[in-house]
Image (cartoon, rainbow, N blue to C red):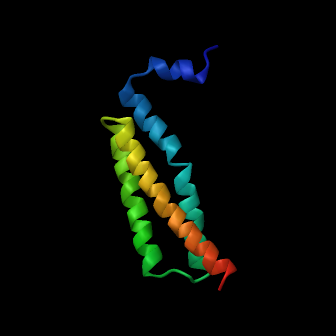
Amino acid sequence: MKKPGELARLYPASVTFPSDNLKNLFEIPVLFYVLAIYLFVTRRVDAGYVNAGWVFFVFRVIHSFIHCTYNTVMHRFYAYFISCLVLGYIFVRAALAHFVY
């Protein structure tokens, strides 16, 4: 029986890149979904959160596009890093609003 990593090497990049990207979409974006639901339920949504959410979305789309096409790791990393910074901003702002106000 072959290990999953060995099987992945048998398939061409046109198959593995979209598959890896789908797995990637169940990591950081899940935190975004949880924060969005929390902000909606607590009625704390404002223009700052909405704009940050769109920036997060755009950089995740860019990340997915890079991952599924030419897959240059540093380009993909920059898109990932910016989306994580935006998610961090949303998280810290929501935490401060929850615990301070």
Residue 10, image x, y percentages = 46, 17
Image vertical order of residue 16 relative to residue 41, above or below: above
Judged from this view, the residue extending furthest toward the right is 99
Judged from this view, the residue extending furthest toward the left is 70
Near-viewer residue (28 or 11):
28
Place residue 32 in its image quadrant: bottom right
Residue 78, image x, y percentages = 39, 48
Near-viewer residue (9 or 47):
47
Image vertical order of residue 90 relative to residue 9, above or below: below
User: Is 49 displayed left or right of 91 in the figure?
Assistant: left
Image vertical order of residue 79 relative to residue 20, above or below: below
**Which residue: 44% across, 49% down?**
80
Can you see residue 67?
no
- On the rendered image, what quadrant is the N terminus found in? top right
**Which residue: 34% across, 50% down?**
62
**Which residue: 30% across, 35% down?**
70
Residue 67, image x, y percentages = 38, 39
**Which residue: 42% across, 55% down?**
82
Near-viewer residue (56 or 81):
81
- On the rendered image, what quadrant is the C terminus found in? bottom right
Judged from this view, the residue extending furthest toward the top is 1
Residue 100, image x, y percentages = 67, 82
